[in-house]
Amino acid sequence: MIRFDHSKRVTFCDGWTRRDFLHVGSLSCAGLSLSQFNAMASQGDIDEKKEKNCIMLFNLGGPSQLDTWDPKPLAPAEIRGPFNPIATNVNGISISEIFPRMAQHADKMGLVRSVYHTAAAVHDTGHQMMQTGRLFEAGIEYPHAGCVHGFLNGPRGEIPSHVVLPESMGPTGGNLPHGQNAGFLGKTHDPFVLNADPSEVDFKVPDLLPPEYLTAIRVDRRRRLRELVDEEAEKFESNSNARLLDANFQQAYTLMSSRNAREAFDLSLEKTAVRERYGMNRFGQCCLLARRLIEAGVRFVTVNTFLTVFNEITWDIHGSKPFTSVQGMKTIVAPMFDQAYSALLEDLQDRGLLEDTLIASLGEFGRTPKINPAGGRDHWPQCWSVFFAGGGIQGGQVVGESDDIGGHPKDRPVTPAEVVASIYQVLGIDLESALPGPQERPLPLVEYGVQPIRELL
């Protein structure tokens, strides 16, 4: 919500001023720095019918392959877990019984059961590789796939090219970057982050006063803040950074004054039955909001299933508190995901958007084949499952196979880089595209000869 709680000077035609904007925004919009709106400039007419979009569902915490999409019913009990496999609508493909709705959409899904990596078994490294294709090294942070898409193709009109819902990833124990920003492309190309829970009754896009100022500057210091902003406004014409800020102001102003952009985030425009179809929880409403944003022209939406592995029930099923157990997934995590994911597939298909919208459901690693003494499973990057739907991918198939206990790839091992390259391929991004950085470089994947998962395409 934009705040108008002060006098105005040198007005635009609709009553706004540059200083008004800086005051209410405090150099930020919806919790972001204004520089992040540089990627939201209009690129003119484009042939949208031939372009693909992407919704990345990131299952923070690392789902257990054995208890979800790669069941092993013939393995010993301490490995196969408490759940039985169920048949899907594709002969020969079974998934866990805790996903009955998804089982009816296997014909749309391409399951990959042989993803692995050899880096440290911590959440952060998996987040980096699965969203950027590379492990960060030597201080170089690689850009999220959505940021690359926005950088190379630009936004459509007045709305962001890449949006992260509901928030960026929080702490997951490694104190490392998660790979959800533009990295070496620069903050100008960072995603628009909602920073709000769309399932809350009073949900609205956050106003322009950034959280860092709310926590760092008390009410009795806001007057001084405005004075500082006004002083910076006087430097616009004489300082290169100020000129950049001025450009960002103009772009952010355009975004906020766009009716299309405001309505894209407005879930009150949806019928109650539609909202309930997705589930009246944070993840369900984020999936619905992702559909609205794609429909409005956003190119890439990243939805974090969860925000942290601490003090929140997630896919991180170690068993002991504050984590959930294997059995706990059945009543808490799985029903939420099963409902929202299935509703998203159906809704996109009903609206004619599925063929042009890739849904990539990813996680940072799998879980140990053997259930631990606490009734959970621990981190296991040696093998796990991801899946894709829409965007023209070949559904109704399984790529790769894990061994008898779901511990290692048995055939067709797939790396995180190949997963990201597949997303690029669907989006029509040339893997040899040059990206600026400390020095001009190709996409991080091509340097190592990485290819997409051809079986899906």
Image: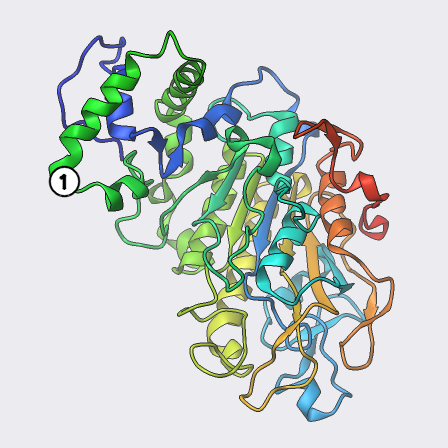
Tell me the residue at 28%/23% (across/down): 22
Q: Compared to 28, does 422 lie above or below?
A: below
How many C-alpha atoms fall within 10 Å of the one at disc 1: few (<14), some, or many (≥20)? few
Q: Tell me where residue 104 appears, x and y as whole percent.
A: 65, 65
Tell me the residue at 55%/66% (across/down): 61
Tell me the residue at 64%/58% (across/down): 126
| Residue found at the very far right of the displayed protein | 411
Colour approach in the figure: rainbow
Tell me: 182 left or right of 454.
left
Q: Nearer the viewer, residue 28 or 195?
A: 28
Tell me: 257 left or right of 221.
right
Q: Tell me where residue 393 appears, x and y as whole percent.
A: 76, 47
Residue 43 lies in quadrant: top right
Say whether residue 346 is visible. Answer: no
| Residue found at the very far front of the displayed protein | 138
Q: Nearer the viewer, residue 271 or 140?
A: 140
Tell me the residue at 39%/16% (across/down): 242
Tell me: 331 left or right of 116.
left
Say whether residue 454 is visible. Answer: yes
Q: Tell me where residue 58 appears, x and y as whole percent.
A: 57, 55
Q: Tell me where residue 299 appears, x and y as whole percent.
A: 58, 34
Residue under pointer 1: 219
Residue 53 lies in quadrant: top right
Q: Secondary structure at mark 1?
A: helix
Type of residue at label 1? Val
Q: Compared to 341, does 94 lie above or below?
A: below
Q: Nearer the viewer, residue 122 or 201?
A: 122
Q: Compared to 87, does 111 lie above or below?
A: above
